[in-house]
Image (cartoon, grey):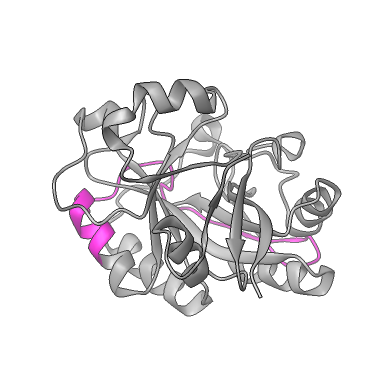
Amino acid sequence: MLRTIRADLHIHSCLSPCGDEKMRPCAIVRKALAMGLDMIAICDHNSAENIAAFMSAGSESGLAVLPGIEVTSKEEIHLLALFSRQEDCMALQNLIYQNLLGENVEEVFGCQMMVNEKDETIGINRKMLIGATRLPLERIVSAVGSLRGVTIASHIDRQAFSLLGQLGFIPEGLSLDGLEISPRTSKEEAQKRFHAYRRYSFVRFSDAHHLEDIGKNITHFLLKETTSEEVKKALHDQEGRRVVEQ
């Protein structure tokens, strides 16, 4: 049976250098449930080191947590990569780490904390997670697809780090599953500005870096299960799954 799922699929944890240190599993899960969410995704910059802790915390509380990464391409374009299985997400992380240079400067970019399901810090990630990988846009989209994931272009209405901001267009043949609109742009404005890309499904997520932002911008999906496969079907309007207009 299909049901409406309230989803915020772009949330950063304390692993992202720009994420608040309070963005830890128990705290985020509590806030998501308080906001009436059914499903979230943790999408830290270029890493999935905190995914296991979040999936564990979500499972204990009845909240679906999808593993994800916000990947930065060679062109400095942000892409959301969403999965159902942790191992697929970690396979993408391995590819990213092979193509990510530099070491984080904590005093400049912020701390990158790895945590467990009890919100305890268990380590510090020293990689330059805020940087761009050496992976071209097309390579990332292809890799996510081969791992049965979902690829959504992040905050296309922003100038910085967005597909349209960096390239000015969406390349022909690029197998994107959807386009994300940031909280700064209304649905009506987005429909006017991006009318040329109406063939794609538009989604809205919080891109939360602080607890108070979680659930402020969400998308309703009509799904059978809370999986990335179901989200992909909804984005392509398949088998009755769809993005629900609100």
What residue appears at the point 62 percent right and 69 percent down from the top-left corner? 226
Q: Quadrant of residue 50?
A: bottom right
Position of the C terminus, as image quadrant, is top right
Residue 63, compared with residue 184, is above or below; it is below
Magenta residues (range):
115-142
Q: Where is residue 4 in the image (x, y as percent from the top left)?
A: 67, 58
Q: Is residue 77 visible?
A: yes
Q: Does the stretch in magenta take in 126?
A: yes
What residue appears at the point 20 percent right and 52 percent down from the top-left corner? 174
Position of the N terminus, as image quadrant, is bottom right
Residue 79, compared with residue 115, is above or below; it is above
Q: Is residue 50 visible?
A: no
Q: Is residue 105 left or right of residue 113?
A: left
Q: Which of 178 and 121 is in front in this view?
A: 178
Q: Quadrant of residue 104?
A: top left
Q: Quadrant of residue 223?
A: bottom right
